[in-house]
Image (cartoon, rainbow, N blue to C red):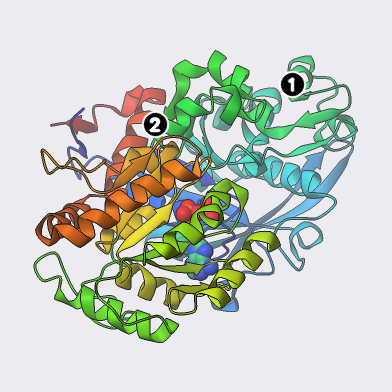
Amino acid sequence: MSMVERTSTKQTKKLHVLCATPECVPFVKTGGLADVAGALPRALKRLGTRVSVILPKYSAIPWEYVSKMEHIAEFYVPLSWRYEYCGLEKLRYKGVEYYFIDNEHYFKRDGIYGFFDDGERFAFFSKAICEAINYIGELRCDIIHCNDWQTALVPVFLHEFYHEIPSCRNVRVTFTIHNLKFQGQFGDQMIGDVLGLAGKPNAVRQLYIDRESINFMQAGLCYADRITTVSPSYAGEIQMPFYGEGLDGLLRRRSCIVRGILNGIDVELWNPKNDKLIHSRYSIQDLSGKARNKAHLQQELGLDVDPTRPLIALIGRLTAQKGIGLVTYAMNYLMQRGVQVVVLGTGEKEYEDSFRYFAATYPRQVSACITFDNALSHRIYAGADIFLMPSVFEPCGLSQLISMRYGTIPVVRETGGLRDSVIPYNKYTQEGTGFRFCNINADEMTRILMDACELYWTDKKAWTELQKRAMRANFSWSRAAHEYLRVYLQLCPEYTNIYVKR
Ligand code: ADP
């Protein structure tokens, strides 16, 4: 479909999207959802929509933002038999309005998640959002865009308690799954005691997953008007038992409203042309700086400073999801082939210790940086030749997008967002932006990895062209924002004439 644009700046009534999220850059971040919630609203705003964001006011939010918040309202939120205080604070930041739900009992804690009452905390958050839409005129919206289990009860509450209220009646809900593994499962005593849904048989039916447990995400997926996830392939995969985490049946039933939209990256932040965190800056027109970054990185990590050795990078959580077991299995063979490997990440102890062992055994070929270091990650993206990402499942994945932007060729397993973002290299047509393998199999991964190394060793011209194609790939947020706008317009067709196709 063609691009969507606003026709006229004179038009006063814009589509209003309220983005409900448990985390958002730059205020609070534990994962990729925070990046999406930080970038998507601004990209949507550039398309001419009105976007507001609502999130909890955690004590982890830096003072530089808290000090600028304006207290705009306070009200009480009904949670079953009691009423809980809720303050509403507002902050305008880079052209977007942010609203913070304030309740110190629930959100003034050392940490964001992982408390015994997380179910109650985010049930309160979801109910407070509904109350805020009801009480606060400027929060009246056309769409609520919910993200992950922490906001999954919003469509349930809206439908069960607010459907007769004019300000809430026409609000439509888009629900985005960022990682289906985390669903918000709790004991069923919450239904009556916290959620106040005991008298609502439909809601009760959608919440239960077994005799005594309920699942917020399951209920949210039942009540949402549109379901999206962060890549088209993951949208298909989660409808199958292997990836479906027990909700594949429900997602198959609702497959006509499920859609995958690939995330973008901040192309200003991740730009080798003006990245201040790397040794030498470079661009598609002049890649010479990349070789200098590699030499500098090899020296910094204590590896042999040798341009002929392919330098393979791994950056990310060292967990089973990321396919790290395949890498540790293949390491001895890779060492015999003379390549170098740099690992930056933390995670399961078994994997951390494996890489420490390989770094001690092959000090001139392996570097294990078992830490979280943003500046070092920039230097690795810029200095490495190949980026390895053999994930078992990957909803979207940002690292492969970043590595392509830096001309570091991704070698990935064909799953989720990896499959959607890396086009396989074809030596006959000279197309593609990386290398892919299919099965969760270390030998298959190694074979494809060595194919990439062969090309690096034997055909410099083809390798450089491959790097340039990878760097040219468009992963900006503007593409994703257009796709989200299309989803919203399906739910609010009355706005379609404002945003024409051309
Ligand atoms: P995840 O499943 O963890 O969200 P993604 O690939 O979507 O994986 O995003 C991971 C992001 O975090 C990337 O931007 C990556 O560069 C960054 N990252 C992960 N681990 C580290 C680390 N140890 N040090 C620095 N950055 C890291």
- The answer to whether 336 appears left or right of 406 in the picture is right
Confirm if mark 1 falls within 8 A of ligand 1.
no
Kind of residue indicated by mark 2: Tyr
Question: Residue 488, which numbered label?
Answer: 2
Kind of element beneath mark 2: helix
**Residue 68 position within the rendered picture, expressed as x and y whole percent measured from the top left:** 54, 74
Mark 2 or 1 closer to N-term?
1
Mark 1 is on which residue type?
Answer: Ala
Q: Residues within 10 Å of mark 2 (few under 14, many from 20)?
A: many
Q: Residue at x 75, y 45 (%)?
A: 124
Structural distance between the alpha carbons of marks 2 and 1: 25 Å
Q: Residue at x 36, y 67 (%)?
A: 338
**Residue 26 visible:** no
Q: Is residue 337 above or below residue 33?
A: below
Choose between 15 and 349: the one closer to the eye. 349
Q: Quadrant of the N terminus?
A: top left
Q: Nearer the viewer, residue 260 or 124?
A: 260
Q: Is residue 188 left or right of residue 278?
A: right
User: Picture coordinates of residue 113 (x, y %)?
Assistant: 72, 56
Instruction: Tell me if mark 1 has few (under 14), some (14-19) or many (20+) residues whose alpha carbon lies within 10 angstroms of its own.
Output: many
Determine which residue is flagged by label 1: 203
